[in-house]
Amino acid sequence: MNDIPAAPTSSNPVLGVPSSGLKLPVTPTAPFIGPLLPPIPPPEVEPPVVPLPPVTPVPPVVQPTVQPPVTQPTTTPIPTPDPFPAPTTSSLGAVRGLWVDAFGPGLKTPAQVAQMVTDARSLGVNTLFVQTIRRADCLCNLSSVPRATDADLAPNFDPLAEVLKLAHAQNMRVFAWVSVIGAGNAAVPNRNPQHVLNTHGPAAGKASWVNRRPDGSYLEGSDLWLDAGIPAAADFMADEILSVVKNYDVDGIQLDRIRYPDGGAWGYSPVTLARYRTETGAAGTPKPTDPAWTDWKREQITALVRRVVLEARRLKPELWISAATITYGAPPLDMAAFHKSRTFSDVLQNWPAWTEEGLLDLNVLMNYKQDAVPNHIAWFDDWNKFALSVRGKADVAAGTALYLNTPDISRRQMQRALDAGVGWVGYAYRTPGVAVYKSGQSQPKGFTALKQTLTGKSGPLTPVAWNAEPPARYALLGRVVGSQQPGGRMVEARSDNGTLLGKTTTDGNGYYGFTDLPLGDVEVRVGGQRWQGKLSAPGVVRYPDLLLKDVKIVPAMKK
């Protein structure tokens, strides 16, 4: 995953990048090389423990156009697989998946895609999570962001389109796996002049969308992240995901890196700070531990999830919505304990709130534990149990770190996950075992060892059909416009008899939304104004934009 480092390499110098003020260096036409890897970390340690005038409807904003189609080359046909056993049918916990990343072979040529799909089919998985938006660029041709610049990526080749064609022919589902906030890597920058870091990067001044620490620095290792608190950056991130949903027949999307970087002290771009002060009335610069500040930032992540999810479901009501979620450290026993976890307090990812609100259909835990490390067996099992306890209507799957474990340990983890009633997703096709990741074993040999262990005698991976549709959702999406402060406004949804159905706040662009509402008339109240619409079928109803004009107080004239 993007939250997981790429495979080791001995020839990957990290280019020197200052903490602020200078443009990122541009690498010449050298082959793509993944970032340097740290050693496998010890177990995570928990840190010490945040009246308006009448409303006038205006037309919804038109989505931006996407890049024109690129003619596809002739592709390599997939070999006919061996006869596949008749699958059993299930729903909850039926996901058997494999992440396919773009930091090595698997997606870069027609032959690689054909081999990957054949391998996945032979393994018996029913779902592929295919890296699509990687670092604000795409392993595809039809999106609002540039193609990934990678010397190994075949010219004009569209990996996502090819995976969809071959995997769907084998009755496998395909999720477009998108890194939402990850924007780039200083060691291997995207060289397209239209890439976001070349237009809104660290050197762009007031137009920069880069997430920063209090001192203005912006690198986490070699990575750069966008700031969800900057309204224009949030628009950009939503648009790149929606462009994939519009242009490809994906079965679902998976949101990855939908959080703040590790360390807590992020979100200090001048635009974000100014917006925070305006919306909350706070003065000065908040400390990283200020609970009001961390609560506000956490809500920016949830608001971005809400907007992307409702916009995507509006385009395709049958689309599955997934997120790859953080499970740092020891598992919580309840929500009070979760609120003290690093997931909630450090990287500000409140995924139980997303499942409770109905924003996720499939929660895939990045439950990357190593059974040989003390406490990790219990941590792995108890994170799965906690996720089930707060799942709402969402399905749950345990994402396991194939790259950190032997095939036998991966088999045990998969069996325990299935016994607990959750699905399974392995990270990753490129690194199917710790021997591949650390000891130079070839990917084909490692994959064969994994397959033999998972599917051999008494192996837990047996073919299971996953044909369930996502839960029916009744939802609405709207926006307030016209105000210099569209964000941070309280919005209520009420039934026709005035019963409160839900509360939320607008994001920095004025968007708000509600899901899992009852059928019938739903009235929205914001800023003392009202608008009533009707929910009559599953899906997302787009309410008209509501024009809210700021009222200027004029001093009375002296007599």
Image (spheres, rainbow, N blue to C red):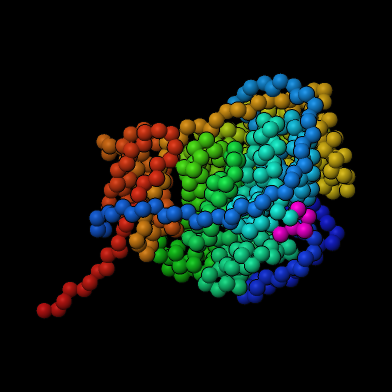
Residue at 69% in and 41% down: 163
Residue 542: image quadrant is top left
- Residue 514 versus residue 33 in the image, above or below: above
Name the magenta segment's main secondary structure: loop
Q: In the image, 160: left or right of 238?
A: right
Image x and y of residue 295, in percent: 49, 54
Image x and y of residue 232, in percent: 50, 62
Looking at the rendering, in which quadrant would you find the C terminus? bottom left
Residue at 62% in and 23% down: 90
Q: Pick out the residue farthest to the left.
A: 559
* Residue 189 in sight from this viewpoint: yes
The magenta span reads 149-154
Residue at 73% in and 25% down: 462
Q: Pick out the residue farthest to the bottom.
A: 559
Q: Between residue 127 and residue 76, name the one nearer to us.
A: 76
Residue 150 counted in the magenta span:
yes
Residue 202 counted in the magenta span:
no
Q: Between residue 193 and residue 503, name the one nearer to us.
A: 193
Residue 172: image quadrant is top right
Image x and y of residue 421, in percent: 63, 27
- Residue 387 versus residue 464 in the image, above or below: below
* Residue 36 in sight from this viewpoint: no
